[in-house]
Every structure is written in C-alpha cells, then in structure tokens.
Amino acid sequence: MNELFSIIWFTPAYVANAAATLSKFLPKTHPIDGGKYCLDGRRILGNGKTWEGLLLGTTLGFVIGYPVLAFFGLGSWSDAFLLSLGALLGDIVGSFVKRRIGLERGEEAPLLDQLDFVFGAFLLDPPLPSWAILILVLTPILHRLANVTAYLLGVKDEPW
C-alpha cells in the first residue's frame, strides 16, 4: 500500500514533463541549443527543447507539486523542485540521444520517450527502491494515456 504513494510523490515530475509542452502556445520560444548542430551534422537538441519550456515546466511542476507533497507529507519544497527540474533535464538528455541516433523531433523512441524524464528526476532526487520500481512500471502506461489525451486536445502534435 505504501508504494502507491510513490505516484503521488512523483507528481512534480509528471506535472513538469507535461507542462513544458505548453510553451508551444507562447508567441516566441528560444531553443536551448541555440539552433546549433553537433559534429554529426544533426541539431544538438532541436526546436522542441526551449528555455521557456524548461522554465514553465519546472515552475508549474514545483507550484503544483509542492502543495501535493506537503499535503500528503511526502516531501519538502526541495523535493518538488528537484523532481521538476530533474524530469526536464532527463527529457533534454533524451532528446540529445534521439538526435544522435538519427531520430527527428516527434519521432517515437519507445521507452526512451516514456522514461528519460523519470531517470532525470531520480538522478536529482532518488526515491525509495520499492517506489522506483513502481514508478518505472506505471509511468509508461500513464505517459501514453497523458500523451494521447494531450494529442486529442491539440496540445501535442503526436500521440506518443
């Protein structure tokens, strides 16, 4: 039963990962890689990873996630911040990896797309081992449901 709290504890990371996509509705965004290319001739990250998305996702992950953690007594403000920021840094690393293996923005990379943000969050704020297992098992399912919903609402361009 206690392991079910892991999903609640991970709320800041889930919110941050989803909220970063909202930056696409801003009038202008600035790619983190500055439009630069890597030695392999591909973009370092691509236009999908922006400073605005990083700021928006981290902020909303914290602002929404911290009260949830506090209400359930599952963590501090630093947990909420580290989970939020870590999730987005993990997503950025995932984009870097996707570019290196030749995948363009929007192309699906099974498991990498669903778990890159999880590993980033775990790196900055490690969970209990039993919580990590449940998060790793449930996140791909929750991620797919959230992305299909966001796609149907017009927030995402792809359902993955």
Image (cartoon, grey):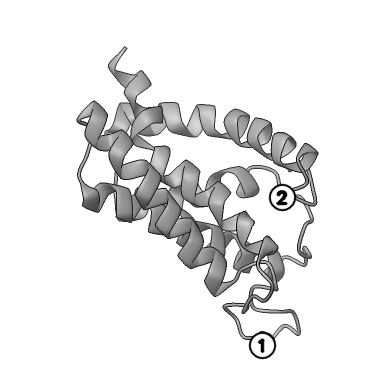
User: Residue 102 appears in which quarter of the rendering?
Assistant: bottom right
Q: Residues within 10 Å of mark 2 (few under 14, many from 20)?
A: some
What residue would you read off at disc 2?
A: 109
Instruction: Give the quadrant of the N terminus.
Output: top left
Q: Is residue 13 above or below residue 49?
A: above
Most distant residue in the top direction: 1
What residue would you read off at disc 1?
A: 36
Image point (35%, 28%), residue name: 6
Most distant residue in the front direction: 27
Amino acid type, callout 1: Lys
**Mark 1 vs 2, N-terminal side:** 1
Whether residue 28 sits left or right of residue 64 in the image: it is right
**Residue 52's x, y, as percent?**
55, 70
Q: Is residue 39 above or below residue 147?
A: below
User: Residue 100 appears in which quarter of the rendering?
Assistant: bottom right
Amino acid type, callout 2: Ala
**Residue 158's x, y, as percent?**
79, 48
Image point (70%, 43%), residue name: 110
Q: Is residue 155 above or below residue 90?
A: above
